[in-house]
Image (cartoon, rainbow, N blue to C red):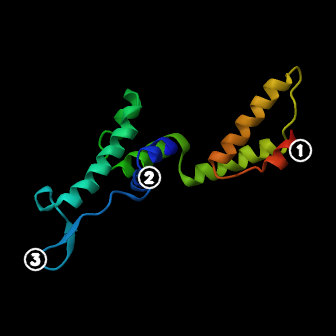
Amino acid sequence: MRDHINEEDYELWDIITDGPLATMKNNDEGVDVPKTRVDCNAEDLKKWEKNAKDKKWLMCGLGLDEYIRIQICTTAKEIWYTLEVAHEGTPQVKRSRGTLLYSQYSNFTMKEGETIQKMYTRFKTLTNELKSLGRVILKKTGLRKF
């Protein structure tokens, strides 16, 4: 997803991870408050357009169950966070999962009756899952293990 969105517009991924680009104004008391649509200039509208584009990219590939989870989200960042927690869990869950997967990696062996191809596929799935959780396995180490 990240690569697909970056290819469209590199700034879009920043909006997903950091939130929409703020459009603020000073109110009568001198406090920064979000601008209403009426107060927005062309530059502000471009910022909100990018958030809307991000929301579209994230929502287009979702099925009904996923859409129901995110339909109340107002920003691309909220949508991404909601989907991330639903599929990957909270940071604590990710750490626990990473520890479990790393243990499986450390104890990785060929199963009885398993072909080399099936073993390699299982190994690549395991290392890809570890990578998605931020635990990178160097190719040299992985090849030695395999």
Q: Is 103 on the left-hand or right-hand side of 144?
A: left
Label 3 Cα neighbours within 10 Å, binned few <14 / some 14-19 / many ≥20: few
Tell me the residue that label 2 is attached to: 10
Tell me the residue that label 3 is attached to: 28
Q: Measure how far apart labels 1 and 3 are at the Cα level.
A: 67 Å
Nearer to us of marks 1 and 2 is 2
Label 1 Cα neighbours within 10 Å, binned few <14 / some 14-19 / many ≥20: few
Percent position (x, y) of residue 110? 87, 30
Name the kind of residue labelled 2 in the image: Tyr
Tell me the residue that label 1 is attached to: 144
The label number, if any, that marks residue 18 in the structure image: none
Q: Is 132 on the left-hand or right-hand side of 66?
A: right
Q: Please give the name of the residue rendered at 37% of the width and 27% of the height, measured from the top-left corner.
A: 64
Residue 45 vs residue 92, the one in the foreground: 45
Q: Is residue 127 above or below residue 30?
A: above
Which quadrant holds residue 145?
top right
Residue 90 vs residue 113, the one in the foreground: 113
Percent position (x, y) of residue 97? 66, 46
Q: Is residue 21 above or below residue 110?
A: below
> Mark 3 or mark 1, which is nearer the start of the sequence?
3
Residue 20 vs residue 88, the one in the foreground: 20
Name the kind of residue labelled 1 in the image: Arg
